[in-house]
Image (cartoon, rainbow, N blue to C red):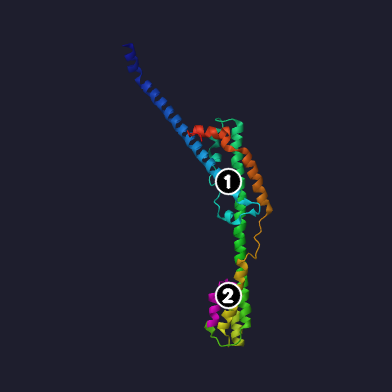
Amino acid sequence: MAVIDFFIENWVNLALIIVGLSAVWIYKAQEKGKLRDAASLIVLQIDELQKRVSELQSYITDKGLNFAAFYESLPLIDVNYWNKYKHLFIRKMDNKSFDNLNKFYQYVTSMQEQQELMKNLQKQFFFVKQSAISNWEFSFIVETLKEVFATSVSPQQLQSICTSSQVNSEQEQIIKNLVKQIEQSNPNVDMNRFWGIYQNKRKLLIDVTDGNSLTAYTPEQISTSLQSLLKQYSLLEISGTEGYNKLRKIAKMTNK
């Protein structure tokens, strides 16, 4: 009877205690879930990164870097989950394990810097090559116009040269002025002859440039840096470290 009276008299306080304990339990369960999710993301990313690094390593041969493979390659990493969540695991693993995971991600991000540098150089080379071709084509137009003074042509045909060529506004104005001078000095310009001469020059230019006549320069340092990073990375063997196994345990993943 005394026990029942105690509960009746203190039911409000007991209810508050129960609610408080429930809140604590729910909070701990949520935090544990967040920790497990973070560990899962990191482990899955490490496994994926090891595959991508292995692919990147295959792009380096005895003959140098495989330019086509680098150009088509995907970025090694988009979101660094270790940097995002590592504060959750500071007290969950020893210093060496924590340091090994830091090193792993440092090696990967450094490799990606070299990968991005390589791809940027390739894109710049394509731009320079296209710019050079456009400049040569413009010079061919000017040279060919100067060569052709034979048969008749209308002002409309002369003007079409400007609109049929991919030139900027400044170059277009130069061509217009040149066309005007030619028309005034000699109205008998054979446009068929113009296009025949110009297309021959243009075809020769394309044949030469498509034949790897331009050297795509790549600093030797990219290859050297990548090989050095890959060597340090291979010595780490992250899958066998305690930190990696600890993350798998927290994520409740079965061992490989």
Where's residue 124, x and y in %?
61, 60
Q: Is mark 2 on a helix, strand or loop?
A: helix
Q: Which residues lie in the magenta part? A: 157-171
For label 1, the SS is helix
Mark 1 packing: few (<14 Cα in 10 Å), some, or many (20+)? Answer: few
Quarter containing the N terminus: top left
Q: Name which quarter of the figure residue 122 lies in.
A: bottom right
Q: Circle 2 is placed at which residue position? A: 172
Q: In this view, does 91 lie above or below 185?
A: above
In the rendered structure, the answer to whether residue 174 lies left or right of residue 252 reads: right
Q: Residue 116 carries which label?
A: none
Q: Can residue 174 be seen in this view?
A: no
Which residue is situated farthest in the top direction here? 2
Which one is earlier in the sequence, the residue at label 1 or at label 2? 1
Tell whether position 85 is magenta: no
Was residue 167 drawn as part of the magenta stretch in this picture?
yes
Whole-percent x and y of residue 116? 60, 52
- Identify the residue at image location x=58%, y=76%: 199
In the image, residue 164 above or below residue 110? below
Tell me if label 1 and label 2 are in contact, CB under 8 Å.
no
The kind of residue tagged 2 is: Glu
Dot 1 corresponds to which residue? 54
